[in-house]
Amino acid sequence: MSLALITGATSGLGIEFARLAAQDGFTIVATGQNKKALKKLSLELAQKYGATVHCLPLNLCKKGAVKRLIHFVEDLNCPVELLVNNAGFGLDAPFVNSNKKRQNNLEKLDVTVVRKLCRHLLPAMLKRGTGAILNIASVAAFLPGPSMATYFASKAYVASFSLALHHELADKGIRVSALCPGPVRTAFWARANADKTIYVRLAQKPDIVARSAWHGLKRNKALVVPGILGKSIVLASRLLPRKWMAAGASRMNQNI
């Protein structure tokens, strides 16, 4: 029995990753803040795929939450073969006007939790010589993001961190991929106070994005960028001055 640990499993991409893991025969540890959504997901995966799902309602921004999750997994006495660092949120507001607590929680969830879970689970993967990590970044990783400065910077960290791990572990049997999608049609935008930006009109379906990530991870692709829009943004970031990219992102981050 192999475990897939999926954070942020209660909506959007997290649910799609859980479905894909269940189809591939994983026993799943699903964590998220919505207890009812976790229960619903558990029942769905058990009925459709015969999957065993261990649910842990948890706010990973809280002090000691990561340790609690790690202890929960260790008590199952089963190796984690797949880690999906999906939990995260955004914040659409000028940096100096934004809520300090939300900024701190964004940094914890989008950066610190990713690092801590990778650091804890990798030694066992290395000892076995097998395992996989999928970290959720964004095309935001490739450009500055006025009005979403901390979020864009956090995704730059995730993409860079994942790419470094990919190369460190490439010859050790461990696959590491960073998913860098453009806008995805999830509740992310409403939670980020960005549901009136142009991004919402351009969003891809989460099941399509998740499948792209899944196939990319299986091929051990370092960066997975699904969709024409995402690929265009990445290409533009390599060709255009950073000042132009920042100006473009600033316009995109405004309400319409």
Image (tube, rainbow, N blue to C red):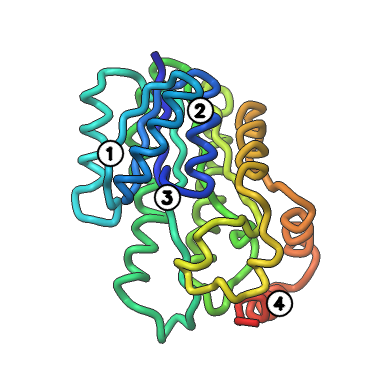
Horizontal side of residue 214 vs 84, given as left or right: right
Ranked by sequence position, the earlier of labels 4 and 2 is 2
Please state, as top left, top right, bottom left or bottom right, where the N terminus lies in the image.
top left
Q: Foreground: 239 or 44?
A: 44
- At x 49% / y 21%, what residue is drawn? 49
Report helix, strand or loop for mark 3: loop
Residue type, label 2: Ala
* Residue drawn where x is 44% and y is 34% of the image: 83
Say which residue label 4 marks.
248
Establish if 50 lies above or below 195: above
Relative to 91, 209 lies left or right: right
Q: Quadrant of residue 69?
A: top left
Q: Is residue 140 above or below residue 57?
A: below
Q: Which residue is mark 3?
A: 87
Q: Which residue is mark 2?
A: 21
Going by the numbered disc 4, the residue's amino acid type is Gly
x and y percent of residue 118 in the render? 39, 38
Amino acid type, residue under disc 3 in the picture? Ala
Q: Residues within 10 Å of mark 2 (few under 14, many from 20)?
A: many
Disc 4 element: helix
Along the polypeptide, which appears first: circle 3 or circle 2? 2
Q: What is the x, y in percent for residue 163? A: 58, 43
Residue drawn at point x = 65 percent, y = 68 percent: 199
